[in-house]
Image (cartoon, rainbow, N blue to C red):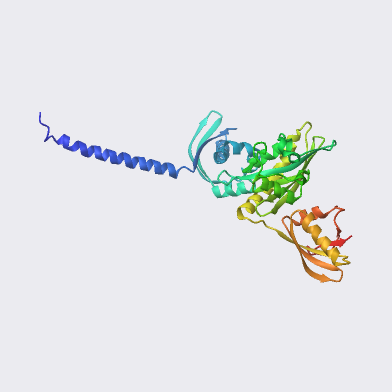
Amino acid sequence: MNRKGDPKRAILPGVVLWVQVFLCLSSAWAQGEGKRESRDILVIGTGLVSEENIARARTAAVGEALNKGVEQYLLRTLGDQGAINHFPRLVRDMISTEKREVENFTILAEERIGRHYKVLVRMRINERVMAERFREQGIVLVKEQPLNVLFLVSQVEQPENRVSHWWVAPEDRMPLSVVELALHQVFEGFGFVPVNRLTKSLEGKHEPELTAPDLSPDEAFRWGELFSVPVVIQGRCEIIHQREVHLHLVALGIEKQIVIMQDSRSEIATESGEEVRRVLDKAIRGIALRMSPSIREAVESGETKTNRIEILVKGLRSFRDLRSVTEALEKEITGVRSAKQTRVAGDSVGLVVDFSGTREEFLQQISGRETLPFLREDSSSEDETIILRVR
């Protein structure tokens, strides 16, 4: 039978064409909607109905939903390992009672089920506020470039005075100490990549003088060069009776040969039977929180910030006295980049010290050190000038 003139046959191709166009447009619209809504979070909250107070139960349900939404955002942003590493700070500090981190929300549905009132909420996170919160807590997001770091931190156990440090014989591949292991795990959580000294080969031979437990910055710089890392963290950790931890760390930038920052922290077990590892983690985390942003800023910008500290040196008897003071400041005080003369008045000379740390950290370093050729003199001056007197 000849169907050449059948009107139904003529209409069919047009119908198929329009169906295809419609499907394509629908698909594009759906993808656009999905992209538009990708920042939105759907979450269910529950409130308990007490004394038939529906309004209070509804408020409680919304509050729970918003908390769960923020938690969902944090888990999605940090990933599994990031959430594990930063869990204490997530549950303590990242979710505020005033819900500043919530940009907006809408209740899509609500239902009472017995004594429970449930709400379905669509919410959106204020990412600017969350980014600020991450920075405040020292949490480094995955998108930031990881930095390799070498740890040169000696472990001293008291009262035995047992000292251990791997660089005394690096070729022996000593296992990671308790302090090393804790440093690796905490700083990994801040986006650093600790050097695995058990598997990484040295870029050259080390000198015998580089094996002392307490290294100078220059000696630590040399180790950084041997391992080809941008950052070295050196220091000392004293563990007393497996209950008390005293930690001092200094961050060094290898390329520019600079002291980026130094910090100290002490922690004591507050609970009976608390493991020293938990106390150690707390001390390391406290320093890493303050130190990590400074390290990144210094390495990524290629320079570090310094503070100018005004000093007045009194009791000078000769130029040799002045030279001994400036040399001691520049060579024996970690973080001092330069000490320059500014004025002379009788037996006193003014100096300006460029120091990569705070004024309090500088005072801490010069206090109680009998080997220095000067001592600090108390001053009632209202300005910030530090007075030193030659011994």
Residue situated furthest left in the rendering? 2
Q: Position of residue 27 (x, y in %)?
A: 36, 40
Residue at point 26% right, 40% down?
18
Q: How many discs appear? A: 0
Above or below, 100 against 318 in this view is above
Of residues 50 and 145, the one drawn nearer to the viewer in this rendering = 145
Residue 289 visible in the displayed image? no
Q: Is residue 320 left or right of residue 17?
A: right
Quadrant of image for the C terminus: bottom right
Of residues 188 and 162, the one drawn nearer to the viewer in this rendering = 162
Residue at point 80% right, 63% down?
311
Of residues 144 and 106, the one drawn nearer to the viewer in this rendering = 144
Residue 128 visible in the displayed image? yes
Residue at point 72% right, 48% down?
220
Q: Position of residue 278 (x, y in %)?
A: 73, 36
Above or below, 211 against 297 in this view is above
Q: Position of residue 347 (x, y in %)?
A: 87, 69
Q: Position of residue 51 (x, y in %)?
A: 60, 32
Quadrant of image for the N terminus: top left
Q: Is residue 5 left or right of residue 25?
A: left
Quarter of the figure with residue 308: bottom right
